[in-house]
Amino acid sequence: NTAQSAIGLLSHPLTFPLTLAHHSNIFVRKSLFSSNETGPQSNDLGDRKVTRLCCVGARAECTLPDVYWREFLVMSSAMIRARSSDAETNYDADAIESSEPLEWILDFVGPEVPRQIRTKTISKFDDIEDCEGQQIRQQQQQRPQLLMNYHASFLHEVILQFLKSAPQAENRTEQIRQFWDGFVLFNPGLGHPNLEKQWKPTIEFLFSTGKPILFTAHSELDAERDASVLEELLAKWHHRDLSHFKECSYEPNPFSSRMEFVDPFPTATTKNSGGIHVVRPNHSVFVLR
């Protein structure tokens, strides 16, 4: 019916910002939730607390209009405030509004990122007319903003570019590992026969950073294939305590797209089973941290 069609159309672009926002807590370091902690852990940029993420293998998500990514700012603020009131934490709930990240940086990285897109910043107040002049501008400076960068390159090329432009550090490897606070991979197809070998070196690098990683898959079959690849790599990984991840269990994503598609490039397994592969962007989700 009309209502379901409308929900499907709206859910399709919103699945990316809302899925990321729903899991935003995993990327925010504990230092941002404490009014007493300062120093390099807080990753400050000037007077603004910053959380920087990398969207690896970015595609459709980097072309969304700003109005959809603004929903990320709205929902992530709500999720972080909810975390502050969790009875199992020791965070200062009174200080949470001033302690949440005032700036998110999202680096879209991948060969399919359009080269013509330029860096931009959006905030929750972009659509409010400046009817009160300086007061509105001051409020805007104290509210979360999202800075989006676009790199039409593979991740290793972006890292090399960063090394060339960054100040020399005593430990360059550690400098790279600390550059991002986490990673997100939307429907990467880690276990797809045509992509598996390409993804393995990237996943191993992401493991080495010790930072949280958010994975999504666009179907149960896709999730099973990706989980198999992750479990195989985790079994061989000894540089990080990941022993509790003997199984990578993808879960249904409440913010998945409601629009279904038939996979135009089915694998031999799908063909041999006589079925069709129906996909929905961000159907399932798995968090590694």
Image (cartoon, rainbow, N blue to C red):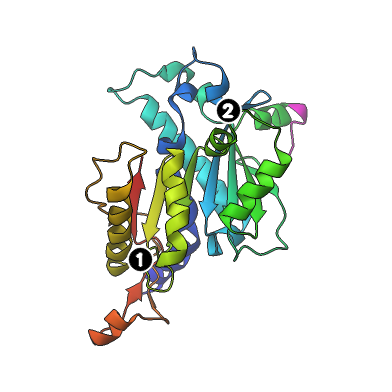
Residue 157 visible in the displayed image: yes
Residue 92 magenta? no
Check disc 1 and give the amino acid type.
Gly
Query: Residue 43: which disc?
Result: 2
Is the N terminus in the top left, top right, bottom left or bottom right quadrant? bottom left
Picture layout, residue 248 above or below residue 136: below
Q: Main secondary structure of the magenta part?
A: loop
* Corner quadrant of residue 125: top right
Question: Between tags 2 and 1, which lies in front?
Answer: 1
- Give how far apart the Cα atoms at labels 2 and 1 are: 34 Å
Camera-side residue of 75 and 105: 105
Q: Is residue 126 above or below residue 265?
A: above
Please indicate whether residue 1 sits to the left or right of residue 206 in the image: left
The residue under the point 59% across, 58% down is: 154
Q: Quadrant of the C terminus?
A: top left
Type of amino acid at the residue the image marks with label 2: Asn
Which residue is nearer to you in this view: 213 or 48? 213
Which numbered disc, 2 or 1, marks the residue that appears first in the sequence? 2
Going by the image, does 214 lie left or right of 232? right
Residue 173 falls left or right of residue 215: right
Residue 12's x, y, as percent? 46, 64
Q: Which residues are magenta?
A: 130-134
Query: From this viewpoint, is residue 18 visible?
Result: no
Membership of 131 in magenta stretch: yes
Figure quadrant of residue 171? top right
The residue beneath circle 1 is 191
